[in-house]
Image (cartoon, grey):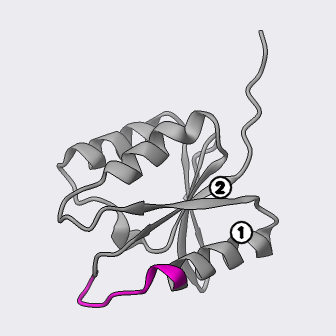
Amino acid sequence: MSSVIREGYRGYVTSRSFFGERAPQHVQNIVIRDYCRRRGFRYLLSATEYAMEDCYLMLQGALDELTSIEGIVLYSLFLLPPRGGTAARDLQSCLRRGCQPARRRREPRYRLEGGRQTI
């Protein structure tokens, strides 16, 4: 049985506003790329969510990709889907399978990583 080598962290950004603010995609990518660089993570190009309200197709694609990558780095927790939707259920399923939400002090970024589960 061969083991799958998982390499890199996929970024996840949006063109939508959240809390009445909008961060340009290039700024979101700079923040994610810097976060990965400082931690020695291999950065994979970001998945950019569609602008339509309540659309999480790119997040779903990134979650599906977790079998071949190390994790997902989100620009903000507020990019995550609200409770009750399909994307939220898929995300919870991922967490139950052992993905790890990781929060760092003084750093509001969120990393979703396969393998371990700690908060």
Which span is picked out in magenta? 18-26
Report if residue 54 lies within the magenta region: no
- Dot 2 or dot 1, earlier in sequence: 2
At 20% across and 64% down in the image, what residue appears? 52
Instruction: Estimate how packed mark 2 is, as few (under 14), some (14 to 19) or many (20 or more) residues with alpha carbons within 10 Å.
Output: many
Q: Where is residue 111 in the image (x, y as percent from the top left)?
A: 57, 62
Q: Disc 1 residue type?
A: Cys
Instruction: Estimate how packed mark 1 is, as few (under 14), some (14 to 19) or many (20 or more) residues with alpha carbons within 10 Å.
Output: many
What kind of secondary structure does the magenta stretch mostly adopt? loop
Which quadrant of the figure has residue 43? bottom right
Q: Position of residue 78 (x, y in %)?
A: 35, 72
Residue holding disc 1: 36
Label 2: which secondary element = strand
Labelled pair 2, 1 in contact (Cβ < 8 Å): yes
Q: Where is residue 80 in the image (x, y as percent from the top left)?
A: 35, 62
Residue holding disc 2: 9
